[in-house]
Image (tube, rainbow, N blue to C red):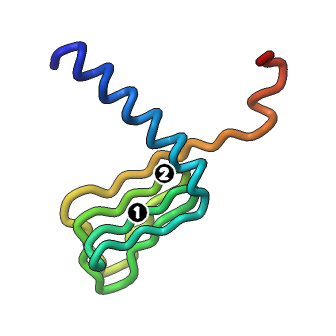
Amino acid sequence: MKWQQLILGFIVTICLIFAGNALAQTDININNTNLIRFGGSVTVPENQVVENALAFGGNVTVSPNARVLNTAMALPVRLRPSHLAGMSF
């Protein structure tokens, strides 16, 4: 992997994290095949098949008899005021 691609991937990841904070608690459900949540957890219900389950700032839970075909990914990143203590802006 080229270092330029790695840097681009890092920048995209940071942008998605900040976008997740801006869209707090927003659900995106595209044709019942992709479950995406910014600022919370995703649960795939029983007997449901989805392609992707993504949670930015939460967890992904796959219920019994549910399936995720491609990607189940959780980025449990949460910034609290205590993390900012001692920082100057």
Quarter the C terminus occupies:
top right
Determine which of the numbered discs, if any, sits on residue 56 in the image: 2
Query: Where 32 sits versus 25, above or below?
Result: below
Tell me whether circle 1 and circle 2 mark residues in contact (CB < 8 Å): yes
Tag 2: Cα neighbours inside 10 Å, few (<14), some, or many (≥20)?
many
Say which residue label 1 marks.
Answer: 36
Residue beneath the point at 44% across and 42% down: 16
Residue 8 is situated, as x and y percent measured from the top left of the image, at: 30, 25
74 sits to left or right of 39 = left
Q: For the residue marked with disc 1, what is the amino acid? A: Ile
**Distance Cα–Cα, label 1 vs label 2:** 8 Å
Residue beneath the point at 39% across and 81% down: 45
Quarter the N terminus occupies:
top left
Residue beneath the point at 46% across and 33% down: 14
Query: Where 60 sits versus 77, above or below?
Result: below
Tag 1: Cα neighbours inside 10 Å, few (<14), some, or many (≥20)?
many
Q: For the residue marked with disc 2, what is the amino acid? A: Phe
